[in-house]
Image: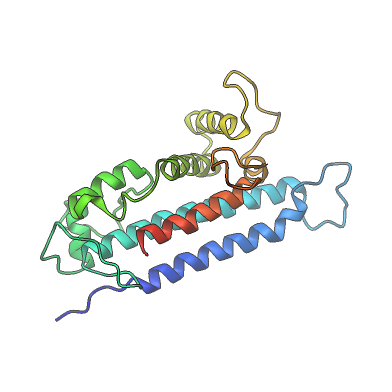
């Protein structure tokens, strides 16, 4: 009998990526808040460069999350259990292996992870897909409404880092105003960027009981906590 696919390596790879992104953030953060007046020629990074690196660290987190969700989902479909032996109640039986799971998810007999692509960025779609394969869609339907909303915002921030389309720009402006607590008709500060948003210290949108801190840290904490919800 073939061995069931394991999730331990998936979890470890994800946690290492988050740790790497956090270390990068902590390393460059001290250089991100200086101004033209305080910037020294001896500084390793210009503040704009530091903010750009922080944005890239955030992009790495969101990309790692989507890879993680796919890896966990596919392995659950193939019959895997979490490192702590959690296993969702399956609605589909006789799944042979990971390749067969990909075929089912894509409805493509010739699906190849190296060539083809499944989207995991829209959590509403992920939750809907999970209800086909698992009872009540759990654990992918275990996220709270706030966690769902913040995931959606994180994808918008990631898309703005990766793309410069008018849609990405306008979506980023909209969520930035919500994060900053300013009116929809107001104008963002000149030169406002993804790096500046991620460095803004606040607890808006993350609950009254959360402490004010940079949004990068709020989102990092979010991605750590929700990963444990889908793979306890």
Residue at coordinates 55% horizontally, 43% vertically from top-left?
A: 161
Q: Does residue 146 appear left or right of residue 34 in this picture?
A: left
**Quadrant of the image for the N terminus?**
bottom left
Q: Residue furthest bottom?
A: 1
Residue 10, position as x, y percentages in the image: 39, 68
Residue at coordinates 58% horizontally, 65% vertically from top-left?
A: 20
Q: Residue furthest top?
A: 185
Q: Does residue 71 appear left or right of residue 180 in this picture?
A: left
Viewer-proximal residue, 158 or 220? 220
Viewer-proximal residue, 213 or 165? 213
**Quadrant of the image for the C terminus?**
bottom left
Residue at coordinates 74% horizontally, 49% vertically from top-left?
A: 32
Residue 74, position as x, y percentages in the image: 27, 61
Q: Is residue 220 above or below residue 13?
A: above
Residue 116, position as x, y percentages in the image: 29, 54
Q: Is residue 216 above or below residue 191?
A: below
| Rendering quarter of residue 212 | top right
């Amino acid at each position: 009998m073939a061995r069931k696919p394991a999730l331990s390596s998936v979890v470890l790879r994800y946690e290492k990526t988050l740790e790497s992104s956090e270390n990068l953030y902590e390393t460059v953060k001290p250089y991100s808040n200086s101004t033209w007046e305080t910037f020294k020629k001896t500084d390793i990074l210009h503040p704009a460069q530091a903010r750009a690196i922080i944005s890239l660290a955030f992009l790495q987190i969101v990309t790692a999350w989507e890879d993680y969700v796919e890896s966990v989902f596919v392995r659950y479909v193939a019959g895997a259990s979490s490192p702590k032996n959690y296993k969702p109640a399956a609605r589909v039986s006789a799944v042979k292996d990971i390749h067969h799971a990909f075929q089912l998810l894509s409805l493509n007999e010739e699906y190849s992870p190296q060539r083809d692509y499944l989207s995991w960025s829209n959590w509403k779609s992920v939750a809907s897909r999970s209800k086909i394969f698992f009872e009540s869609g759990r654990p992918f339907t275990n996220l709270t409404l706030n966690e769902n909303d913040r995931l959606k915002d994180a994808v918008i921030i990631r898309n703005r880092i990766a793309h410069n389309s008018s849609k990405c720009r306008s979506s980023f402006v909209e969520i930035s105003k919500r994060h900053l607590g300013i009116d929809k008709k107001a104008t963002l500060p000149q030169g406002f960027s993804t790096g500046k948003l991620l460095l803004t210290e606040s607890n808006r949108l993350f609950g009254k009981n959360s402490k004010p801190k940079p949004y990068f840290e709020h989102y990092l904490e979010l991605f750590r906590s929700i990963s444990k919800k889908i793979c306890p």
